[in-house]
Image (tube, rainbow, N blue to C red):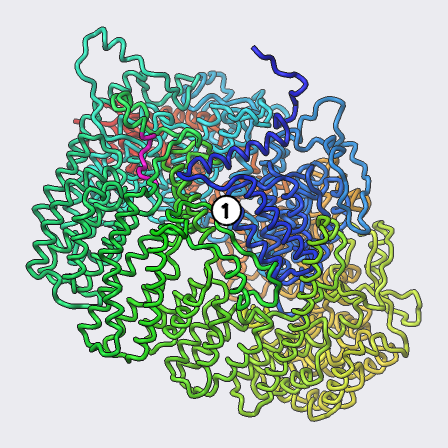
Amino acid sequence: MALPDISLLSLSDDPGGPSNTQQRYADKYLQYLRSLPYTVEPESKILELLDFIVLRLTQAVSARDYEVGFLQWDTMLTHWSMLKYELPKETRVRLAKIYWHLSVLPGAPTPVMAAAADGFKALTSSTKKISIKDMRLPWRPIFDILSKEMFLTRRQFEYTQIPWVMGYIAANSRRFFHPAAINEMLSVFVPLINGTDLDYMLAAQFYMLNFLPISHPQSYLPMLFRLWESVNSHQFDERMLDFLANVTELHVAADVSDPRHLAEIPDDAKSEGESRPQWNEDDIRPGPGQWTGIYQDVGIFTEQDWSLIMFKCLSSMEIGLADGGSLSTGSSADRFVAAEIGRLPKPEWRIESLARIIVYSMAPDGVPTPPSNAPTPMFTPLPSGMNTPQIPTSNSIQDYLSAPLARRNGGITTSKYHTYLAGSKSLDSLSRVIASLENFFHPSNSGNFTTSLAAFIKYVAYDFNKRWMEEQQPDCKTPRNRRLTRQMRRELVKTLRTVALLAIFNEDSTVVSNIQSCLKSMSVMEPDLIVHPILERAVPALETLVETQRTIAVIKALGAIAPAIVSRKVYYPGAKHLVPILQMLENGIDINDPTKTLHTTQFLVEISQCIMFSDSTPEHQDSESMSRTTVRPSLIPAFSLDEDDDTEFPRLSDAEEDASLQDTTGSFADWVSSFIRRVYLLQESLPDEGGGSSEVDTVDAVGRACSAIVAHLSEPLYDLVLNMVYDYVSTHVRANAVRGIHLLVESLANASPAKCMAKFFPLCEKQIRLELENGASSLRTTAASSPLPSDATLHWHLAILRGCVYNDGNAILPYQDRLIDLLCLLHEHCRSNRGFTWSAKLLSGSLLTLTHTYPLENKFVNQDEWDSPEFRKNHHLYWGKVYKVEDVKISWHVPNAKEIDCALRMFKRVVEPTLDTLEQLLNPDTVRNAIWSNDFCRHISFVTNAFSGIPTLFQDVFDEKALRKAMETSDILCEINEMIGVIEPIESGFVLTDPTDPRYAYISSLRRRFGEFLHNASRSLTQQGEENTVDAVEMLLDGIRSFMLDYGDGRDGYHTNEKKYAAEKNIARHFAKQKEWPRSVWIRRARFYHSARLHWNSAERLRGPLEDLLIDDLVEWSLWNYATIRSYGQSILESICSLYDGVRQRTLPTLYKALDPGTDDDRMKGALWTLNLVSFGKYAASELLLAPELVQKLFSCQHNEKPSIQDAVSTVAENCLNNLPEPCFLAYDIPTPELDAVLPVFQPEQLSIIRSCTEKRKERVALMNRRSYELTEAILAIGNKSSTHWKYEIAAVRCLRTIIRRDVAQTPEQIRYFISKTNDSNPNMRYYSQRSAMKSLRNLKIKTFARSPKDLALGRNHNPLCLRLPVTPTHQFTHQILHTLTIPPDLSDVNLRFLDKDPLPGWLTWPTTIALYKPPHPEKSTFLPWDNEGAGTVAVVREIAMTASFWEQLSTFYSEENSETNISLDNGMSHEIVFPVQRQINGPQVSYIKSIFQLLEDEPFEVLEPTLVSLLSEKEPDKQRALAEFLAGLIGGSKHWPLSKQRKLWDWFKPVMAKIFNENLKTDTITIWESFLAYLFHNKDPRRLQPLVDHIMQLWLTMDFQPELTFDATKILSIFKAFFQELNWKFTSWMDPVVERCWKQLEVRNHIADVLLFASIIKARPAPSEPTTETFVRECRVLPADHDIMGMRGQYHRDKILALVQKFSGWREERIPGVRAFQSTYDRMGITICTFLFEHLLEPSAIAVFDYIVPLMPELFRFTEVNDNEDLATRGNDVLVQMCGVNPPRQLINPIIDGIFDTIQNSPSWRVRLKALPLVQVFYFRQMPRISEGKVLSRCLDDEVVDVREMAATTLSGVLRLSPRRHILTLRDRFVQLIRKSHLPPRSDPSYARSIRQRHAAILGVCALVESSPYTVEKWTPGLLTDILAEHTYDPAPISTTVRKTARNFSRTHRDTWHEDSARFNEDQLAALSTLLTGSSYYA
């Protein structure tokens, strides 16, 4: 024996290292090749092809030929990847780097960026193929682009795809960012966090969660949780959960996060200026031993983190309760989130994320609870009173009922350990969540949330199954002590089973689909727990068939568990149930219920592909042989439980199971016969002609089922079915069943083509000849129509014969002569449309069967196994067999010489003579009447179908020279030939490949002859006119389509096979990353790979002269008079564009010509709708070289005023002109040293191609520059033409706006046009013109201050006044910065600096530097002179703006706008996001004015001033709005004027300001001036507007809160609110005195509440010891969890709130009841506080409000009982309800519960108690994951008021669902003891009422226990119902009423599962229950 070389052994995870990995992928490629029936090219050729593609791609990148060369070769690389060969790692790394650098290249065209991003993802998606050890990438380039594009400025309005692409790239690149860069990233991202502005919070979160490497999250994960806990936002939650799901799944393995790995990774990808700060991380440094991972209490999370995740889990379901208002307010907090955040890539759905987090956090990390089947309770409670207190002798039993459920010592329970389900904390949490949600899975309680619930359990089951299977693999990296256990798996299934079985009956198809998936996963995990309950539900549903919905649900459930029924590996005992199920499903085939039929057939297909239908009943054997044969071959079951007592259903031995199964297989013959008869019945029940689409779908579904069943019949059963079908078809003819019978015969042919042909061909031949002799199909028709009854027999047998020739050409050969004769006869005599069409399809099907390459069979085992005697005898042991790919043997049909000869004979006998006839029909002297049209149609139908049946008979000759010649008219414009990819053919199963072969020459020449005929026929028919031509033209177009497209994969398409392969995998998948599949999946994969190779050969066809002529013909038909012909021609033309290069270039001139004046209307319509196709109009618009002509042609269409024409023009313009590119060629000028370093070293001959390509690229850019100018001039000419219609004018200005360039200054003509059109009478014209002008002037500013092409590309200007200064971060510095904003500036101070941009840094931590702005020079201009190229633009603007008429006219239009203006953002052409705003200034109009004054400074002011003065005196709202817009733009534009000019402006504005705020503020103008202030203070240091600030503060300080007119106070408060809200955090230093004044004026309600809310938000400050990122991140790790480092607690108003609490009692005493109650201080103060609290609950900082709610809670309850002030009562209730849905601080959860309980126990008002009780249940439900122990509600069961007692019971029931089992048992004993010792005295006894109340209290407690498990029956439930409650059925009311109500509820909730729940009751208990329900016993 040879010993291994020990030196070659490796300790790495992948034995053998990278070479072994490459070998594994090479073996995988070989498996693909082995699945094919033909030899392929050598591996060296594939690699040569790859090298060539990569060479060309890198050459294109080197030449900066991005838009053409790179995209071309990227497409070639995509095609190459279809061949499934593995990229060498070096090539993969090089390409990934190239793609990455291109995706972050500033200024790169969007298609290039998107293609590079997608390519990068494809190259790096596999973590096994490429890792950070192979490649590192810098993070900073992505961030630089993304941060610049994240938020639009107010003069930006065109959305781009850049933020999405950058976010996409960041997420896919993150694993290649070096973990050593984490600290640097945090130091950039964390300072961006500002808790006072949710937009910036979400942006900072996006940066962190998409950039930070997740391999080493231990340093920053605690910080993220602290941040998350403080933010109330749905969007924040969604992205955080997505991130945590990825982290959790990755870190289920311990060694991933080992810091020692960092040293092994080269740190070679630093950006310029990037550093690696070293922070103090002693708390997370690894010790000397082995790294044990980052595991915490629950997975990688602490207990506190986990409780937060589970709270988010519960709130994510968005369960609506009866309270109507306790849902999470996260979505409300998101209501004002900027639209820009929505442009970022969306995170994974939170439901999927939560499931992954929960599953990958599961581990044996706790003490296990007793298993679910253990006796309950585990011990008898001691009689010491520890658990059940003694019943008191006092009059009240409340103390007894409310005694603690467990004795506590110092607050700690006496239980030594906390136990968890299966020993897993995560699983235990999941179980509690599912228990709390159980009721909402029931169909009667379904709502919008049910989809989320169903999806949640689906993903949990799927992910658990996935992880379980991963951990069974030998290379699993999860530590063994952290892996899932069998007990966890079993308990998970038990947890999900009940709710899944409830939800399966839901009416929503999406819900049921999710539940099916869940059941499927669980049936694979623990089949015995799932199969039997479903079977128990299936039997009654399928036997009675009373409720259709229930029957369908059961069939779907059976489909879900099909693997457990048929697979002996999944569930060995399951197979014995199959035959009984099949027998019950016979009625599922029902034409009257298509849905039921579809699901039944789907089930039949799924199970048929896994079994053999054969009788395997053993013959009689003697005892000795029996003892020998009962030993079954070793087939290990799917699971083996150590806990035998945990098996819910008895399990027989394998031998007994086999015997039982074999007994059932004897019924297969009867079932198959019955099934076939059922199929006949369905077909006979169809409407005439087979019905509509629903019936067709049903028949097709039954056909698929027949195919699957017949393919798996044993030989005797096949013969049985064959004879049954033969007997039926030979004695019946049914016109409505033709389709069905065709599919049935096709199924027989698929299974055994030779037998089928032998059986049916003679019958069909005889009958067809007989029918034709008797005149069938002799009536000439050319269009599809209802067939004549006399033709039914012919059609019947034609359908049968078509089915016979479905499979294996060898089966046709014995009958070829007779078949050809029959085809000739059919061709000669069939004259009706259906007759000749079906005959032609028979020809096509025969040829396809003879000449195509396809798998012959699809059985569930290999053919040799199927034929083996052992399999036939014991096939039941193989059911559900799955294969490894190497074990599959596929039988292919490969055409042999005889089959080819047969096919060619068909062409010579049938097709060639027909083609001769067709050519004669085109003779000019032939009479063209209806007979001619019929002859033409039937002849061309035969020829067309013949050629469509031979897509792989012969392979086109690869003529590279001809291809290169065709490139001269390529759709790829202005490119050297070397850069245009040519696909060289590869071996793909074509039959004839040698052009010298006579057979090849014959068929190729005949096909060319057919093409020439098609062209001649097109010319002839176009000249013929309309009569008798429409049907002929349609047939002709069919012929052209077949000629041009039916080649290679035309009939067996790549994309079709891809979808089918994916669908089959989805059906067969048992778990994720499955390696073994049913044989049918491997066969489908082989077919898919075969089609991929065919697709390679058909991807690019040679466009020769004949093809050009046919393309021209198609264009003409696309412009023809008849709409149906035009539409068909256009669809063919669209399809051809994807296969033939140059079609568009050839077609566009004809289309353009059809738009000229004088063209027929129909032809013009055809041209327009053809241009509307993606392949034409969008192509022409996106190519700058072609766009000018397209635009001119479209704009010239206004000559035709017909509405339908103009509608078409409008549609084409919207769809095409939106694709006009913004001309920008900066990307070619930006240096790319990092990209250049990745490119290979080129050889001299390669460099010459690069030089040629570079020259061609420069030539193309120069040409595009010229075309850009031409386009601009052309559109300007159209826009300036007086005859241009206003709609076309608007389109013109939109086009002009789109093509405004940032790299070249605008021409004076352009800017003149834009400025002049801003005074157009059409508001839409003004709207677009203003934006165009703004874009032009903004580009001028950028161009003036950009320092490089990169700056221009990024839109980055360097303001000369901007400085970046270093920061010394301290809290004192933060305070100083904020305080500085309140000090009036000394403009003469040289050290004065302004803080303009938002958000102001420092809220959490400070960056290393901040941007500050110097004041402008006193005299010199900051910006003037502007860029020299823009001098013409400036001159034009100055010329226009210096005329008074311009401003007067503009003010007229601004003043006349509708009062409901819109502030909108749009992305270029039409996709506009509109926010309706009433009575506010129009932001874009203000920015337009601002742009002019920024450009010209104060020059136009003198001209504008008279207009302003005039508007100032006007009081109309629209005039005031126009004034506000002019003033806002004027002041905004003066920001960087010289100080002297600013001073002059302010001197003018101060009296104007005083007049505005003192006189002009009215109720209808107040919002206008609010928006005016918001605009001015946006992103601005308030000191720049110091006079305005002073005036506003003066108004505030002198305001009278109690004026004679309320509006006098309201207007000042409104202005003040606009001021402080826009300043946001910058207002901090003003806040204290403002709030102090407000607390004294609480009665002003809403405005004061707004101030208090604003103060609470901006005064909440994080509290790290230093405002540095390092300190903050470290302290989040090391400080206790209860330390409020985020400052999220409500401390700012706390003292005031406490003082207010004391005052409320006095105000309550002083309150005046009745109609004047609302005037009392108590009510006014209460409404103000409730408004403040409720609005705070809707904010992102909602968590802070609980510190205010807790002390106010008693008063809030008192508010709710106020009956003379509905407003106060409603607001108080709203606060109490809404708080339940918000996440409170952990420390306040118990105080909140205590506050509610205190109210319940101590409130003297029963109404308050009644309202407080449901709140307990709501709060428990919403906050369940964060509540550690339940509290006793039982005290209220003894309330004096019946309604309160009953509500207490309802509440108790809900709380008990969420409570530990031990509490339930304790309460049970307590209630039972009280009932048994209760005694009812006579009614006359004084204690009677008290005794009734006490017994009722105990009865209510028992009822609450019963109803706490609404859909299950606990072991103690029967005893409580029948032994306790039944005894009190006839007690006095309300006891008896309560008992009967509980019994009815129990009956209702257990009706669906009574067949299994009844087993929990014995006979006596069932009798007692019947008496309880009906009053009499059924069993008596």
Residue span colored magenta: 855-863
Residue 1121, magenta (yes or no): no
Q: Is residue 282 left or right of residue 565?
A: right
Question: Which is more toward the observer, 675 or 1889?
Answer: 675
- Residue 584 spot, x, y in % from top left: 21, 36
Question: Which is more toward the observer, 161 or 306?
Answer: 161
Q: In the rendered view of the protein, which quadrant contains the N terminus? A: top right
Question: Which is more toward the observer, 1057 or 1892?
Answer: 1057
Q: Which residue is mark 1?
A: 82
Question: Which is more toward the observer, 1720 or 824?
Answer: 824
Q: Residue at x 27, y 26 (%)?
A: 576
Q: Residues within 10 Å of mark 1 (few under 14, many from 20)?
A: some
| Image quadrant assignment for residue 1306 | bottom right
Number of marks in the rendered image: 1
Q: What amino acid is found at the position of numbered circle 1 in the picture? A: Met
Label 1 element class? loop
